[in-house]
Amino acid sequence: QVQVVESGGGLVQPGGSLGLSCAASGSAFSINTMGWFCQAPGKQRDMVASITKDGTPNYADSVKARFSISRDNTKNTMFLQMNGLKPEDTAVYYCYAGYLTNPPLRAVTAWGQGTQVTVSS
């Protein structure tokens, strides 16, 4: 079973930058796509960015020019660099990791507890 833990949220002024980290730990056959969702109060959870095991990124249109996702497969960690932050980026950010369990293989998604990002002056 895999667990994921986020870190790095906080308060930042509009136009500022923040980095979020995600660490996956535990036993698995393989850890595949990892990524981030965010959820603002009263809204649904939306995809922010994801990255495949071979490093191919995917971004929501709203963050494409501002955020950058990366990962280190040797450490099972993932990093989201957020630049040019806007008040509408304020949300709880959740890390996830899609993985295959040890045999018998099953596809499972592990979610973190979330970290708050607040963009405000």
Image: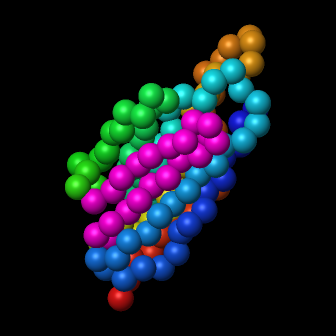
Which quarter of the rendered picture does the C terminus lie within? Answer: bottom left
Tell me where residue 40 appears, x and y as whole percent: 43, 63
Tell me where residue 10 appears, x and y as whole percent: 52, 75
The quadrant in which residue 63 appears is bottom left
At x 37%, y 82%, the residue is 13
Q: Is residue 35 visible?
A: yes
At x 28%, y 59%, the residue is 66
Tell me where residue 11 appears, x and y as whole percent: 48, 79
Q: Is residue 76 above or below residue 21?
A: above
Q: Is residue 114 visible?
A: no
Q: Which is the main secondary structure of the residues drawn in magenta? A: strand
State the residue in front, 105 or 21.
Answer: 21
Q: Is residue 80 above or below residue 27?
A: below
Q: Is residue 27 above or below residue 9?
A: above
State the residue in front, 16 or 61.
Answer: 16
* Residue 80 within the magenta-colored segment of the rendering: yes
Residue most extreme to the top: 104
Residue most extreme to the bottom: 121
Residue most extreme to the front: 74
* Residue 95 within the magenta-colored segment of the rendering: no
Tell me where residue 74 appears, x and y as whole percent: 62, 37
Q: Is residue 50 above or below residue 31?
A: below
The magenta segment is 66-85
| In this picture, residue 29 sits left or right of residue 85 | right
Which quarter of the rendered picture does the N terminus lie within? Answer: top right
